[in-house]
Image (tube, coloured by chain):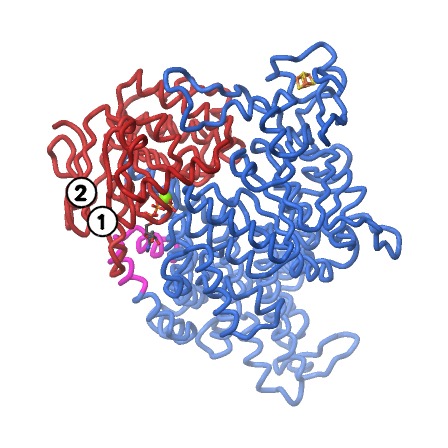
Chain colours: A red, B blue
Amino acid sequence: MNGLRLRGVTIRYGAGPRVVSDVDLDLPDGAAVGVVGESGSGKSTLARSVVGMVPLAAGEITRDGRRLRAPGLRRVPDPGVQLVFQDPHGSLNPRMTVAATLTEAARQSGSPERPSLERVGLADGLLRRYPHELSGGQLQRVAIARALAAKPKLLILDEVTSALDVSVQALILNLLRDLRADLGIGYLVIAHDLPVVRYLCDKVAVMHRGECVEQGPCADVLRAPSHPHTRALLDALNEESP
Amino acid sequence: MTAALRAFRSTSAGPVALAVLTLLAVVAVVAPILWGDMATALNPATAVLGPSAEHWLGTDRLGRDVLVRTLVATRTSLGLGLLAAAVAALAGLLLGGLVAVLSRRAREVGLRVLDAVLAFPAILVAIIVTLILPEGTASAAVAVGVAGTPAVARIVVTLATAVLARDFVAAAWGLGVGRPRILVRYVLPNIADSLAVSLSVVAGAALVVVSSLSFLGVGVQPPAFDWGGMLSQGVMDMYVTPLAALAPAVMIALAGLAFGLAGEAMARVANPSVWTARRAARHPAPAAGTRTESDALLDVKGLTVTAGAGPEAPAIVSGVDLRVGRGDIVGLVGESGSGKSMTMLAVARLLPYPVESLADALTLDGHDLRAGPGERIRRLLGTRLALVFQNPAACLNPSLRLETQLTEVPRTHQGMNRAQARELALAGLRQVRVPEPERRLRQYPHELSGGQRQRATIAMALAGRAGLLLADEPTTALDNTLRRAVLNLFREANAASGTAIVLVSHDLSVVRGLCDRVVVMYAGRVVEEGPTREVIARPLHPYTQALVGSTLTMTTPLDRPLPALDGQPPRPGERQEGCAFVPRCARAEDRCAKERPPLRAHPGARRTACWAVEA
Ligand SMILES: Nc1ncnc2c1ncn2[C@@H]1O[C@H](COP(=O)(O)OP(=O)(O)OP(=O)(O)O)[C@@H](O)[C@H]1O
Ligand code: SF4
Ligand SMILES: [Mg+2]
């Protein structure tokens, strides 16, 4: 299979307890998979392990059959997988302009041209601004543009819309749907918001206390959940939505 | 920059430091030119004289004027102090930078080594290094610089490690940016200001240490002289001419202090939250004895918040009224930049510098918050007001364990002892369903997941049992089971102790689940308000309609784009005469751009500000 494959992924911070245990997950190229679960269930940790920010305690992560992460394996960046963070204010260097940030990203991927802001629905006028001069939604779009500069096969989106206003959320979600249709890239969507996963993904995995308790096509899992925890997530949602 | 300078000068330490340092600089330049010869000319005839009209501070044992020598020595003393500081800064930066980019494990080792070296008194290290270096005036300074290097390196590592943990560094690494470049382009620019602060303190210390070396006879060698050397000679004649020792001693203390104060003032400028207390005092004081008759718990009238002072300053919030009765739960919605958070911060008297606020009325429990000395207001707010902020990182101090932070309010405001406060904190964490609360108390904020951090701040806020809770996006980082739990907690606090709540959110479903009344803000003004259910079911204002329309649910159709509100709200300062929503409004008419729609009443206790809605 071409794409990302997680097998038996287990993670702990230092000598602490397991935060992620024995997770298997397949992300074929171009697929969009959501990971949902309660707070602290290890979703972000899992996402960070893929890009090498936290080491694995056991298991392995491969991409296109090549070993990418495993215990003791040297930490090297893989431009083919880019992470977009939840907090747009923290994910851009406050001392670099938008132009400098994008130029830097392009330089790393060896392309002479700076990625365009138009691609993510922003005007070029923003290029000379610094992060604190942009709104959260604009920053998040710059972060997406930066990630796209590496021409990734897979974007990991860790709660990318949860810090944004509803109206801006809708813009970003539309953008992400368009990008996937145009570029054929895959998504690993980390979210606590089920409607977001439902809107973006074909498949969903449910995490509970570090374990993946259920996975399958969105339509099936969300309509007929088999694990009680998934049911609880859905119930809570139905109770509060209008 | 000018704003920073202004801020610097308005700290209490700033002007003093600035004045003393300027004076010292002038003396350092001028004195050797004017009195250089006089300071070194020997004259046995005038040896060890007391103060006189001719020699204000008397003379030393070789007949030289003490005052003149003290002034002339300023150049050498300051010069050497600065040279030492420069050496320490440069070497410390290199060493610290090196340790900071090491792998996690190697960094630990590097830090241990640094700490071990730091346990040595710097002056001892300096003496040893002086003995190794060739004799000369500069070597004393270099020695002190070398001795100060580990301290600077330690500061650099601490600052750099914090920056290295930020997401933007991870993003750069993920793109393939190399370590040296990360250090230069990402870390350095982000620690520069804090580093400058530390370095000014280091400069003051270096000056004192160089003087001490001279005093001990291993520093500046005669015939060259600095304050330390003068002091050591003066001490020998302490009983005859005490001023010969006192004058250089005072100068050392003065210069050391001035650098220290400058550092402190810079630190205050770098940390705007220190400013908030001062802002409160800037408010026009109301007439005496204003205990208002308002029966609302919180009563805000005509609140205006501006970015900076004066009539020209752009308005962030304009003329907002907000009334919260005892036990009320009010929702405040609107997109980011609409002024929700600034309204909350203005109520809490926590506006960041240089933001200012003005209000026709601003009372909490009958007390005028605009008035009075900062201390009294702060105590009032500390006991009656609790805050939960959107960004949990901002209200948790990254360098303190949770226990310290969660027990602070109960200990300082409720007079609890440590054990009681700890019990309360544990109960609070359990209440918000944070797993393993005992372990969490020992952890630092970064060791918690995003949602756990947010819940910890909620626990902190509820622990205070305040009459009014201002919660700014309290549930954005939470999944929906937890969101429900937290909202239930709010509901319980409201039912049990009548805590009134103002909930700021952009998420209508949260507001709908909790709030009786909702206030919708756009571009710094209230555009709609009314009972939550009706407003969401039948929004009147086009902006509210768009907000309701773009909310994603489990039944949102998947085959077409979401209805989104395109464009940006006008930024403060770009706001026009008429309705601020004109550029994004499908129903805008000619009149909208010219005249601002007033907030008009509608049936069912509703109000909205739109020309297109029939009054
Ligand atoms: N740097 C760290 N050191 C120690 N423990 C950590 C660290 N980061 C996270 N953890 C722990 O790992 C667990 C999983 O955290 P993670 O951030 O992956 O959760 P999450 O599913 O993303 O939750 P949320 O939805 O709240 O963001 C939590 O119990 C958290 O306390
Ligand atoms: S006043 Fe005019 S522009 Fe403003 S919201 Fe109403 S219709 Fe739209
Ligand atoms: Mg997370």
Q: Residue furthest right?
A: B288
Looking at the picture, tell me which residue is in the foreground, B468 or A179: B468
Residue B26 can be seen, yes or no: no
Q: Residue at x 20, y 25 (%)?
A: A29
Disc 2 on helix, strand or loop? strand
The relative height of residue A152 versus residue A193 in the rendered view (above or below) is above
Disc 1 on helix, strand or loop? loop
Looking at the picture, tell me which residue is in the foreground, A78 or B344: B344
Which residue is label 1 attached to? Answer: A55
Q: Residue at x 43, y 56 (%)?
A: B89
Looking at marks 1 and 2 on the same chain, the residue that comes earlier in the sequence is marked by 1
User: Which numbered disc covers residue A69?
Assistant: 2
Which chain is disc 1 placed on? Answer: A
Quarter occupied by residue B339: top right
| Tag 1–tag 2 contact (CB < 8 Å) | yes
| Total numbered circles | 2
Q: Is residue B65 left or right of residue A98?
A: right
Q: Residue at x 36, y 61 (%)?
A: B436
The relative height of residue A192 versus residue A13 in the rendered view (above or below) is above
The residue carrying mark 2 has its beta carbon less than 8 Å from ligand 1: no
* Magenta span main SS: helix
Which chain is disc 2 placed on? Answer: A
Segment colored magenta: B91-111
